[in-house]
Amino acid sequence: MAFFNGNNWIEINRIATSALYGITLCPDGKNILITGQDGTLLKGNIDDGFKSLKNRSINSTFYNAAFYQDVIYIASEQGLYRYKNSEYSIVSELSDVQGVISVEEKDGILWVLSYKHLIRFDGKTWDRISHPDND
């Protein structure tokens, strides 16, 4: 990993043994989340360091993450994880969805992309948008 301070690139000592796949800016504007292989989830910054939020019982790859309504949602091969109050859980409304490859918040909507579905969450309802070729 490396950090650009506006003038120079600063290489960061290795902070995880797993491959890392995504960076998400935290709402506090100071920290980032880093997602990776084997359930890796790190939170922190270049100045204060990083804290592992990993749950050793989860070995799925975490592709990326998004903040939505004070909850962290994490895209993984096992489905969509919710991380809240230091606890991981699969989103029960989507427990049958595997292969979640991306999650993103945009204009108050949480968007989830899996192998077969595009899913839209407005904070109340999970809407699945199927592609006709995937039926």
Image (cartoon, rainbow, N blue to C red):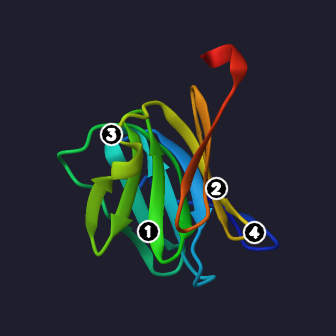
Above or below residue 36? Residue 8 is below
Element type where label 2 sits in the image: strand
Q: Crowding near pointer 3: few (<14 within 10 Å), some, many (20+)?
A: some
Above or below residue 30? Residue 21 is above
Q: Position of residue 24 (x, y in %)?
A: 59, 62
Dot in front, 2 or 1: 2
In the rendered view of the protein, which quadrant contains the C terminus? top right
The residue pinned by badge 3 equals 38
Q: Residue furthest left?
A: 57
> Considering only order in the chain, which callout, 1 or 4, is on the residue closer to the N terminus?
1
Q: Position of residue 61 (x, y in %)?
A: 40, 37
> Considering only order in the chain, which callout, 4 or 3, is on the residue closer to the N terminus?
3
Please tell me which residue is depicted at 69% across the width and 26% down the height of the picture.
131
Please tell me which residue is depicted at 41% across the width and 61% down the height of the picture.
42
Please tell me which residue is depicted at 63% across the width and 82% down the height of the picture.
29
Q: Label 2, label 4: how many angstroms apart (C-alpha)?
A: 10 Å
Q: Crowding near pointer 1: few (<14 within 10 Å), some, many (20+)?
A: some
Q: Amino acid at mark 4?
A: Asp
The residue pinned by badge 1 equals 43
**Which mark, by number, is residue 104?**
2
Q: Amino acid at mark 3?
A: Asp
Dot in front, 2 or 3: 2
